[in-house]
Amino acid sequence: MEYKFTIPLRPITKKNSQRIIKDGSGRSRIIPSVAYKKYEKQCASYVPHVETIDCPVNVKAVYYMPNRRRVDLVNLHEALHDILVHYKVLADDNCRIIVSTDGSYVDVDKWGPRTEVTITELETG
């Protein structure tokens, strides 16, 4: 089975969008930024509504950024994978489910930043 979809929003990372807050006990915690939480919420209407995938998959993602600034592919993957788990597309983002991200890369589209995602279920043997 294969699922293809596009998130027509500027890709954002979680790592570069964090806040440090004090919880009720006075301890510091790191939480996602307001910008990331907004991005996560906006993604809801673009991710497929499918039965949660809990078998090995390849998650290929092509991230189209609005400029040539350097961006860390791993951080982009982290945000995407967390969103896929949050919206129950994937059961988890551990290495038993997301076994590869083959074919993923970053490109530039000044006028149409987006993430093109292809999730391919892999044969188990």
Image: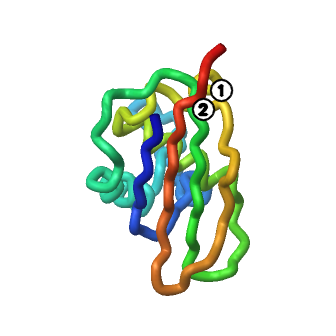
For residue 63, which numbered disc appears in the image? Answer: none
Residue at image position (38%, 52%) is 40
Describe residue 61's horizontal placement relative to residue 85 as left or right: right
> Picture coordinates of residue 11 (x, y %)?
51, 64
> Picture coordinates of residue 2 (x, y %)?
46, 40
Q: In this picture, is 99 found above or below 65?
A: above
Which residue position holds label 1? 95
Describe residue 101's horizontal placement relative to residue 35 as left or right: right
Q: Going by the picture, which residue comes out furthest to the top?
A: 125
Say what amino acid the circle numbered 2 marks. Ile
Residue at image position (60%, 55%) is 76
Which SS class for mark 1?
loop
Q: CA distance from mark 2 to mark 1?
A: 5 Å
Which residue position holds label 2? 98
Figure coloring: rainbow
Work out whether residue 22 or residue 5 is closer to the camera in this orientation and state it.
Answer: 5
Work out whether residue 82 or residue 54 is closer to the camera in this orientation and state it.
Answer: 54
Q: In this picture, is 99 found above or below 40?
A: above
Describe residue 20's horizontal placement relative to residue 48 as left or right: right
